Structure formats: structure tokens, C-alpha cells
Image (cartoon, helix red, strand yellow):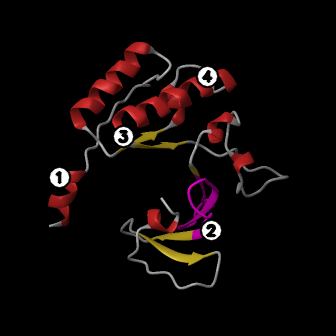
Amino acid sequence: KQKKILKQNLKIITYSQSLALDNELSRQYLFNLLEQTEPDGVIIDSLGKLTMKKLDEETVKIVMHHLGVMRKKFNCFAWVVHHNRKANAENKKPDSLDDIYGSMYITAEATCVLLLYKKRHDTTIEVFNVKNRLAVEADDLVLSRDEHLHFTISSTGSNREVDNESNIVSNFGM
């Protein structure tokens, strides 16, 4: 039953090349695809695929502008995967907006920013809610992954009880 529901409600469209929003032809391709599929949301992996240029201030502002136009035009959400700065001697564990790789304008337009951190050879992923405009920032979470690649919330930044059947998105006020 779950597979049937998932098949009806989830469309995964892979595109193995960059889909540069700062290019009119690429943008039109994406917008035509969204017109045909009418999604509730779009998940893009990763931000670097949305331009062929360096992620400097000007480029990021243009890409974010077109993401905003897309969200408004198609009444959909957009989740964009991006990468943290590499850990270093002064900052061993990236856990703030300053740890997002690239221009500060990447996070300026975002409604919500979640930062993930995983140690090498560890089965847990720490989730930091570093920005949330529409709700109170949620406590940090630790997700545990089992051998079947199932994820559960193993702990939070507080002592509150966690229902592992709950949807992680709802814990972040989205």
C-alpha cells in the first residue's frame, strides 16, 4: 500500500547535467517541466548544479531570484542541497550559518536552513536548525541510520520525548 501511495505522489526526475537558472534556455526547460508535472515541491541536489559559474555574490543573487520566481509561479516549495565548509583546526564541527560554503547570499533568501554533520565512519547525523523564519528554531536532532538505511530520531538537543514515527519536517516547523 505504501509503495502505491509513494508511486502516485512522488515523481523523481533525474537530470545528469547542470540546469543553470541563470541561463534562459535551461530555466525555460525547468519551467516547462514544472508546468507538466505540477509538483508541490522541488528538491535540487545541489546548488552548484543551478549555475555554470562560480557561486559568488552576483551569481547567487541571480539563482536565488529565479528560485523565488519558480516558487511563486508554480506555488511550490524548493529545497536545495548545498555543502558545508570543510572542518578545520579552528572549527572542527560546522554548526552555524557561517559554515555554509560560498556566498552569504545563499542563506539570505532561505526561509529555513538545516545543517547536517556526520563524522566519518559514524551512523549518526546531527541536524542543526540554523535558520527558520516561519517558526521557532527547533532543537538540534541526532538521526541514527541502521543497516537497512532506515533513519530514526535518536536524540534531541533537549530532554523531551521523541516519537520516532513522526515526520522530521514537522519537527522543524515546515
Amino acid bearing label 3: Asn
Q: Whole-Å distance between the Cαs marked 2 and 3?
A: 29 Å
Q: Say what secondary structure mark 2 lies in.
A: loop
Which residue is tagged 1? 8
Q: Say what secondary structure mark 1 lies in.
A: helix
Q: Are marks 4 and 2 in contact (CB under 8 Å)?
A: no
Q: Whole-Å distance between the Cαs marked 1 and 2?
A: 32 Å
On the image, the x and y values in percent for residue 127 come to 59, 62
Amino acid bearing label 1: Gln
Which badge, 3 or 4, is on the more N-terminal residue? Answer: 4
- For residue 87, the mark is none
Q: Whole-Å distance between the Cαs marked 3 and 4?
A: 24 Å
Q: Whole-Å distance between the Cαs marked 3 and 1?
A: 20 Å
Question: Is residue 128 within the magenta segment?
Answer: yes
Which badge, 2 or 3, is on the more N-terminal residue? Answer: 3
- For residue 59, the mark is 4
Q: Say what secondary structure mark 3 lies in.
A: loop
For the point 29% across and 37% down, which residue is it? 13
Which residue is tagged 2? 140
Q: Which region is colored magenta?
A: 113-141
Which badge, 1 or 2, is on the more N-terminal residue? Answer: 1
Amino acid bearing label 2: Asp
For the point 32% across and 21% down, which residue is it? 29
Which residue is tagged 3? 75
